[in-house]
Image: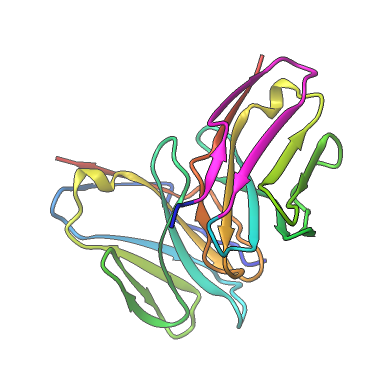
Amino acid sequence: LAKTTQPISMDSYEGQEVNITCSHNNIATNDYITWYQQFPSQGPRFIIQGYKTKVTNEVASLFIPADRKSSTLSLPRVSLSDTAVYYCLVVDDKIIFGKGTRLHILP
Amino acid sequence: NAGVMQNPRHLVRRRGQEARLRCSPMKGHSHVYWYRQLPEEGLKFMVYLQKENIIDESGMPKERFSAEFPKEGPSILRIQQVVRGDSAAYFCASSPSSYEQYFGPGTRLTVT
């Protein structure tokens, strides 16, 4: 199973773009890269998923370099409500959550 | 389309009692996953089920824990003879496939 490594915590300010990078050196050919967001006392919420290059949706963008050994979640113009834990996962047939990145948005 | 439903949301049990946690997947989803989360920790995979079948239970403790997903009705996570260390938030997720998962609000189990 591919293991992911991401920063334990990050701080940013409202209106800024936030980039959270995750490393997954052992990613396999069939693995997808998925990001989830979790607020306190709630279940995780799917944000975005990609396999290579760039994926964008209404919430975020996901950048994946050619070697796929890392990925970057980009949150444009964050607000206070984006304060949450963000999990990077490499998905084959089982989803393994690490401790995630605690993002704290400051006013 | 209602989301994943879990009940109860909060459950208090004394040591030695049984805990039953229920999960109703989203309509059309035949894959169900159970996770456990301790405070300040990430989610830990417990078991993956499809209708009437356990696909992967590698994360389940060998004793006292069991899970089922019958042909009709919700998925059930059962913990027998609960101990204080079982206190945690238990999340259920459902999926139409094995990639994207939709999580329920969780059941917070407190063992006194």
Q: Is residue A37 left or right of residue B111?
A: left
Residue at 44% of width from left, 40% of height from top?
A: A42
Q: In which quarter of the image is residue B33?
A: bottom right
Percent coordinates x, y for residue B67 in the rendering: 76, 46
Q: In which quarter of the image is residue B18?
A: top right
> Height in image: B87 above or below A85?
above
Q: In this view, does A71 lie to the left or right of B90?
A: left
Residue at 51% of width from left, 50% of height from top?
A: B4
Q: Is residue B58 left or right of residue A26?
A: right
Q: Is residue B21 magenta?
A: yes
Q: Is residue A74 left or right of residue A78?
A: right
Residue at 43% of width from left, 47% of height from top?
A: A8
Q: Quadrant of the C terminus of chain A?
A: top left
Q: What stretch is highlighted in magenta?
A: B4-25
Q: In which quarter of the image is the N terminus of chain A?
A: bottom right
Looking at the image, the residue that sits furthest to the front is B72
Q: Is residue A20 magenta?
A: no
